[in-house]
Amino acid sequence: MVDTASLQKQGFRPYRKVGTTYAREMDVHFTVRIESGDVITGNPGDYVCVNAEDNTRWIVNGDIFRRTYAPDAIDTLKIRMGTVQHKLLLQGFKPYRKYQVTWAKRLVLPMTVHTLEGDVHARAGDYLCMGLDGDQWPQPAARFERLYEQVSTKA
């Protein structure tokens, strides 16, 4: 578990992801080209995730996914045929919501982030995100600001 007091001293703030993520557990090794152009690698048991609004894709370690995401209660019968969401459902993806807090801070300088799935390049202005176990990943600023909202750390 991460030390939240230490993260706050380093400039990290708590955020919660909004919206639905479509995800599918994979049973083979696989790769995904992410928005930055970097290619990341998943293992059997990991999840390939998709944001249906902009078709961005990423990978989440299977154990982390099961601890931080829950099925989304959307009515999949009301999803219109031919939409991205419908196509994802036909490909075996299911809707989920991330319920765990993500700690993040805006980067001042570009850097290479060593994620669980491989090295990813981040630009100045992007956000560096940190998960429950200290796992890190970058998010482009526009995407992060669209999909995450800051939350209070008070109980």
Image (cartoon, rainbow, N blue to C red):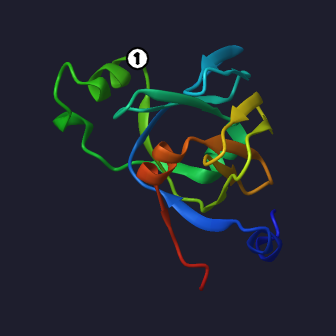
Q: Quadrant of residue 3?
A: bottom right
Asked if residue 115 shows in the view, the reply is no
The residue that appears at 63% across and 45% down in the rendered structure is 66
- Disc 1 is placed on an element classified as loop
Q: Which residue is mark 1?
A: 91
Q: Quadrant of residue 112?
A: top right
Residue that lies at the very extreme toward the bottom in this rendered image: 155
User: Residue 97: x and y, percent?
Assistant: 46, 50
Locate residue 31 relative to residue 113 in the image: left or right. Answer: left
The correct choice, above or below, for 117 with respect to 68 in the image is above
The residue that appears at 55% across and 49% down in the rendered structure is 69
In this view, the residue in front, 27 or 53, is 53
Asked if residue 78 shows in the view, the reply is yes
User: Residue 28: x and y, percent?
Assistant: 68, 14
Locate residue 36 relative to residue 7 in the image: left or right. Answer: left
Please identify the quadrant where the N terminus is shown: bottom right
Given the image, on which type of amino acid does mark 1 rest?
Gln
User: Residue 140: x and y, percent?
Assistant: 56, 41
The correct choice, above or below, for 12 with respect to 68 in the image is below
The correct choice, above or below, for 90 with respect to 79 in the image is above
The residue that appears at 46% across and 53% down in the rendered structure is 145
Q: Quadrant of residue 61?
A: top right
User: Residue 89: x and y, percent?
Assistant: 35, 25
Locate residue 23 relative to residue 34 in the image: left or right. Answer: left
How dense is the environment of label 1, judged by Cα within 10 Å: few (below 14), some, or many (20 and up)?
few
The residue that appears at 72% across and 32% down in the rendered structure is 121
The correct choice, above or below, for 79 with respect to 136 in the image is above
Locate residue 151 relative to residue 128 in the image: left or right. Answer: left
In this view, the residue in front, 37 or 123, is 123
Please identify the quadrant where the C terminus is shown: bottom right
